Amino acid sequence: EVHLVESGGDWVQPGGSLRLSCAASGFTFSTHWMTWVRQAPGKGLEWVANINDDGRQKQYVDSVKGRFTISRDNAKNSFYLQMNTLRDEDTAVYYCGRALRGVDTWGQGTLVTVSS
Amino acid sequence: QSVLTQPPSVSAAPGQKVTISCSGSSSNVGNDFVSWYQQLPGTAPKLLIYDNNKRPSGIPDRFSGSKSGTSATLGITGLQTGDEADYYCGTWDSRLSAYVFGTGTKVTV
């Protein structure tokens, strides 16, 4: 069974940093694009970033460019979202996903709260 | 704000049918496949429809998708109380170089 599990969500002050992780299982991780999607409290879904199968291609929504970095470790079947210079508006549940047919598999989500 | 527009809410009685529209442009809906997602209260989204009209394994045929030009539609027939959820369309936008989601539609049964 295809399975994704996020970790790393926490409360952080504005300007701070946080690293989210997503552990994958049940499929050949190294052959798939992966993605991060977030959802602010009471709001809709917002795509954050994609990374291709070998980690060389990365795409970001404009609002996080220069602050967030997506990466992966195929040997560990995991990928990550390094979030720097966090802002209040980055507060959201962050979902990791497999970027196939849109997003065909989602993790359960991890909450990031940015507040002073 | 999203570049894909959906109605905020739709409602119908159990057993009836609803349709949800997703209006975009030539750089997104008109240029790539559309997916639909269901988000039950308090849970992660789930893929419902991909490639405009295909259903993943396990998704009942009560759910259907279609696309014409720069608009896509999700249909749900035989509504059940368990279908009460938020529904989102999504596709790649070639102008923004970003995946975009619709504004979301709350279905009430």
Image: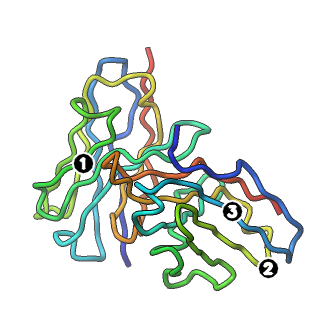
Numbered disc 2: what chain? B
Residue behind mark 1: A59
Q: Are marks 1 and 3 on the same chain?
A: no
Identity, as a three-letter code, of the amino acid under mark 1 = Gln
Res. B20 mark: 3
Q: Position of residue A68 (x, y in %)?
A: 25, 35
Q: Residue at x 59, y 75 (%)?
A: B65
Residue named by callout 2: B78
Q: Decide which of B109, B18 is in the foreground and name it.
A: B18
For the C terminus of chain B, which image quadrant? bottom right
Colour treatment of the image: rainbow
User: Relative to B70, is A20 on the left or the right?
Assistant: left
Tell me if label 1 and label 3 are in contact, CB under 8 Å. no
Of pointers 3 and 2, the one earlier in the residue sequence: 3
Q: In the shown orientation, is residue B101 left or right of residue B107?
A: left
Parent chain of label 3: B
Q: Residues within 10 Å of mark 3 (few under 14, many from 20)?
A: many
Q: Which secondary structure, mark 3? A: strand
The lab-note entry on whether marks 3 and 2 share a chain reads yes
